[in-house]
Amino acid sequence: MKVRVLRPALEDLAAGRRFYDRHANSVGSYFFDSLFSEIDSLVLYAGIHRVHFGFHRLLAKRFPFAVYYRLVAGEAVVFRVLDCRRNPNWIRKALEKTE
């Protein structure tokens, strides 16, 4: 399966990287690499995750982030990568704006 990452998801990853870089040196790079590894796993595991707010939700293993994606025409399309510590209403609104 192919995986496509949309611009809002890339912007979420960049914001997360900046956040972790402010707290410790090179943690931002580790965050970025870790989340992209999770996204890469969608090549094999796309579609097995539970649906939340109309999107499949892949929970990251090492950071409190979730990858929200949909299956579209034979590929996994990553719409957002959001911090799970945010208010669920904020997450829902962020996903609604993405559609």
Image (spheres, grey):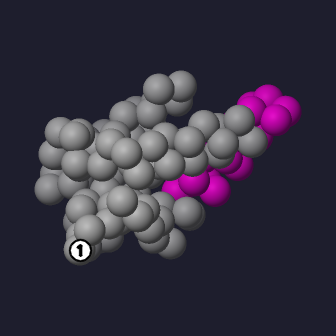
Task: Residue 83: give x, y in percent of width and height.
Answer: 44, 41
Give the quadrant of residue 73: bottom left
When the figure is inspected, residue 85 is found, relative to residue 91, above or below; the finding is: above
Prevalent SS, magenta region = helix
Residue 45 in the figure: left or right of residue 5? left
When the figure is inspected, residue 93 is found, relative to residue 25, above or below; the finding is: below
- Residue at image x 23%, y 39%? 49
Decide whether residue 19 is among the magenta residues.
yes
Report helix, strand or loop for mark 1: loop
Report the front residue among 67 and 86.
67
Decide whether residue 23 is among the magenta residues.
yes
Task: Residue 84: give x, y in percent of width and height.
Answer: 38, 36
Residue positioned most to the top: 62
Q: Quadrant of the N terminus?
A: bottom left
Q: Amino acid at mark 1?
A: Ala
- Residue at image x 71%, y 35%? 30
Residue positioned most to the right: 25
When the figure is inspected, residue 54 is found, relative to residue 98, above or below; the finding is: above
Q: Which residues, given as a range, are shown in magenta?
A: 12-28
* Mark 1 neighbour density, 10 Å: few (under 14) some (14–19) many (20 or more): few
Q: Can residue 12 be seen by looking at this rendering? A: yes
- Report the residue marked by disc 1: 73
Task: Residue 64: give x, y in percent of width and height.
Answer: 46, 30
Report the front residue among 71 and 23.
71
When the figure is inspected, residue 77 is found, relative to residue 45, above or below; the finding is: below
- Residue at image x 85%, y 33%? 25
Residue 51 in the figure: left or right of residue 6? left
